[in-house]
Image: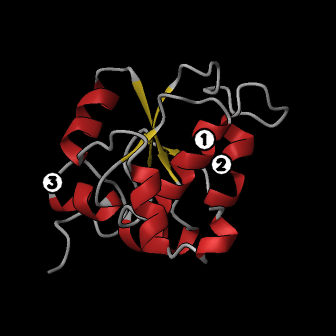
């Protein structure tokens, strides 16, 4: 039975299916991998969220609509960091939803080590990992 015959897929089912194809990482693991020098953190949040909440030091800022163009090692608009399909990329958004869909797209480009951070920037901040700019204290509860 094809997808069209079984009806549309809802976003929750799509997220579950996508997330089942790779291992997501916690903020603590993302911090460890990025500080050890082996992983590139990529912030796909839009400008208003970065202005409101701050940034993770050292993370590349690549808004979601440019992600594939900037990280494709074969692309003409790639970032200098996009040197190989073996690059370890840890994508994060605000709360860890859009980043999962972004990882599926990066996998389709051959970036097989791409993953995302559970809970996104908000979890990173709540756990007390380094941030800069506005909202650099613990997340409001």
What is the distance, in whole Å, between disc 1 and disc 3 at their CAs?
Answer: 28 Å
Q: Which residue is mark 1?
A: 106
What is the distance, in whole Å, between disc 3 and disc 2 at their CAs?
Answer: 27 Å
Q: Which residue is mark 3?
A: 128
Task: Give the residue furthest to the front.
Answer: 1
**Residue 104, position in %: x, y?**
55, 47
What is the distance, in whole Å, between disc 2 and disc 1 at their CAs?
Answer: 8 Å
Q: Which residue is mark 2?
A: 67
**Residue 137, position in %: x, y?**
19, 65
Q: Are marks 3 and 2 in contact (CB under 8 Å)?
A: no
Decide: few, some or many residues near mark 1? Use Cα within 10 Å; few <14, some 14-19, many ≥20.
Answer: many
| Label 2 vs 1, first from the N-terminus | 2
From the image, state whether disc 1 or disc 3 is nearer to you.
1
Image quadrant in which the C terminus is located: bottom left
**Residue 77, position in %: x, y?**
81, 37
Q: Which mark is residue 33?
A: none
């Amino acid at each position: 039975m094809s997808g069209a015959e079984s009806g549309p897929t809802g976003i929750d089912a799509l997220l579950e299916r996508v997330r089942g194809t790779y291992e997501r990482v916690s903020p603590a693991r993302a911090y460890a991998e990025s500080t050890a020098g082996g992983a590139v953190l990529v912030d796909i949040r839009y400008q208003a969220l970065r202005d409101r909440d701050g940034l993770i030091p050292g993370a590349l800022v690549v808004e979601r609509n440019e992600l594939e163009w900037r990280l494709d090692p074969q692309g003409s608009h790639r970032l200098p960091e996009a040197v190989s399909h073996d690059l370890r990329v840890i994508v994060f958004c605000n709360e860890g939803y859009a980043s999962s869909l972004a990882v599926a797209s990066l996998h389709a480009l051959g970036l097989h080590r791409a993953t995302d951070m559970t809970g996104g920037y908000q979890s990173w901040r709540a756990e007390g990992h380094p941030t800069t700019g506005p909202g650099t204290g613990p997340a409001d509860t």
